[in-house]
Image (spheres, rainbow, N blue to C red):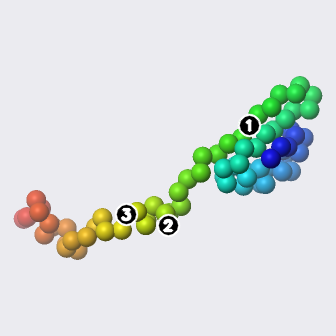
Amino acid sequence: MKISTRSLVREFPKAKAAARKGRTVEIRDGKTGEAFLLIAKPIQTFGELAASAKGVHAGPRDLSSREGFDA
């Protein structure tokens, strides 16, 4: 996605959404010709993180009865 610095404020929600999807957003200054790249690192959603954690807390619900926590 390519946008200019003049349209950055107007197009920022679209640019942010595109960057979050992993697309590179090029912001070009019309006066100087400088180009800036906006790239966001995609992160995992909570559901994706929770799916990999299933079974981690298997065992007795009372933590004090687990090994090493005897009273």
Q: Tell me the crowding category of disc 2: few under 14, some 14 to 19, or many 20 or more residues within 10 angstroms, Cα based.
A: few
- Where is the C terminus found, in terms of image quarters? bottom left
Tell me: residue 31, above or below residue 20: above
Q: Using the numbered discs, state the Cα–Cα distance from disc 2 to disc 3 in whole angstroms.
A: 10 Å
The residue identified by callout 2 is 47
User: Mark 1 packing: few (<14 Cα in 10 Å), some, or many (20+)?
Assistant: few
Q: In this figure, which residue is indicated by the disc labeled 3? A: 53
Name the quadrant containing residue 56: bottom left
Image spot of residue 9 (x, y percent) = 84, 47
At 72% across and 44% down in the image, what residue appears?
Answer: 24
Seen at 88% across and 27% down, the residue is 33
Mark 2 or 3, nearer chain start? 2
Describe residue 14's horizontal placement relative to residue 7 as left or right.
Answer: left
User: Amino acid under label 2?
Assistant: Gly
Label of residue 68 in the image: none
Q: Secondary structure at mark 3?
A: loop
